[in-house]
Amino acid sequence: MTASKPGFATAVAHANIALAKYWGKQDSALNLPAVPSLSMTLSGLHTQTSVHFDSGLAADQLLINGQERQGRELQRVSKLLATVRSEWGESPFATVESQNNFPTAAGLASSASGFAALALAALAAAGLKTPLGRVSALARAASASAARSAFGGYVVLEAGASEAVPFLPGEHFPLVMLVTVLTDQRKEVPSTQAMEHTAKSSPYYPNWVGHAPRVFAQIRDALRARDFTALGPAVEHSTLAMHATLLAAEPGIVYLQPETLHVMKHVRQLRDQGMPIFFTMDAGPHVKALTLPEHAAEAERELARLPQVLRVIPSSVGPDAHVVN
Ligand code: DP6
């Protein structure tokens, strides 16, 4: 795919939620994951990013939802752009403009869709080839969960892998993820930092790394077999085991808020009443509830009426990242 004008391209990538969680690095410098993870790409949450390489600029510039960003966020973006520039053999700085259709950095996987959209837009703007495996590897070096947002459907990132691979298309087992937004506050500890702290100080971390591949295999096999009664409990176990590892760090990292626990409890109550629904949480307070399409409307109503829930974003399985010029 080529850019519509030289040096410019726009791409869209969708957020993803891990059913089997990635937490921890095999190699911090290369940003390779310590455990295998498996995600669902979300139709309802996406980032659109434009990259404009311009030889008149004195430095890279970053705008997220119209606001200029500097510091750590800009550094991570510049690092990705530097990789593209060295492959390209040209060295102009770039303006990067990114729009999310959901709250940024509140633990809603904005870095995943953000870096995947940036990787694709930057490669396309430089006129380089954009096979999605290459997009995935470039995004992974910036943020490992972003490797999975290059692809639609259900996506696997193996332990130590440099790029994610598509596992199954959404049509194989169309599920619905209900993202309950519990706060618009930015999260306290960024996941990269939290992972490093957990690996260093949590006595449970070695157990997590040893155990996660078994949970991953259960989730992979249940998805392949379209077995929701096997999938749901394994998804809940993956997130709770990850949070247990975080809680046991010194000092403990607590992403789960009182609102989080209320919604988790409500999900289990709905299940006790016969609804097939399971929860998962990432490095933030929000609860994402996984259900079957025929129960999605009722589940959404049930979650939206809780006072702890600001809003619910329903998502079916989303598509591959793509250029939109
Ligand atoms: C809890 O991909 O944000 O969302 O590679 O350091 O950027 P870095 O970490 P990041 O971690 C995401 C962790 C998670 C689980 C997951 O998405 O698998």
Image (cartoon, rainbow, N blue to C red):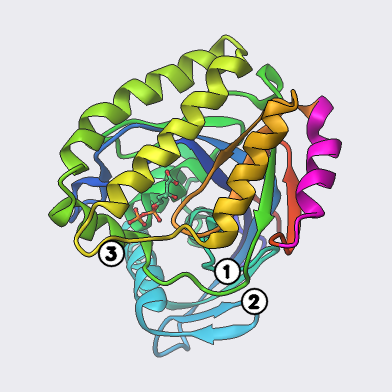
- Locate residue 274, reporting x and y percent: 74, 23
Labels 2 and 1: the sequence-earlier one: 2
Q: Amino acid at mark 3?
A: Gln
Q: Is mark 2 within 8 Å of ligand 1?
A: no
Mark 1 lies on residue: 104
Choose top left, top right, bottom left or bottom right for residue 241: top left
Q: Amino acid at mark 1?
A: Thr
How far apart are the alpha carbons under marks 1 and 3?
Answer: 18 Å
Which secondary structure, mark 3? helix
What residue range appears in magenta?
A: 294-307
In this image, 88 relative to 180: left or right?
left
* Residue 303 inside the magenta-drawn segment: yes
Labels 3 and 2: the sequence-earlier one: 2
- Residue 144's place in the image compared with 174, above or below, is below
Mark 3 lies on residue: 193
Examine the residues drawn in magenta and state their main secondary structure: helix
**Visible in this render: residue 107?**
yes
How far apart are the alpha carbons under marks 2 and 1?
Answer: 9 Å
Mark 2 lies on residue: 65
Residue at image location 20% in from the left, 42% down from the top: 204
Of residue 35 and residue 185, the one placed in the foreground of this image is 185
In this image, 249 relative to 279: left or right?
left
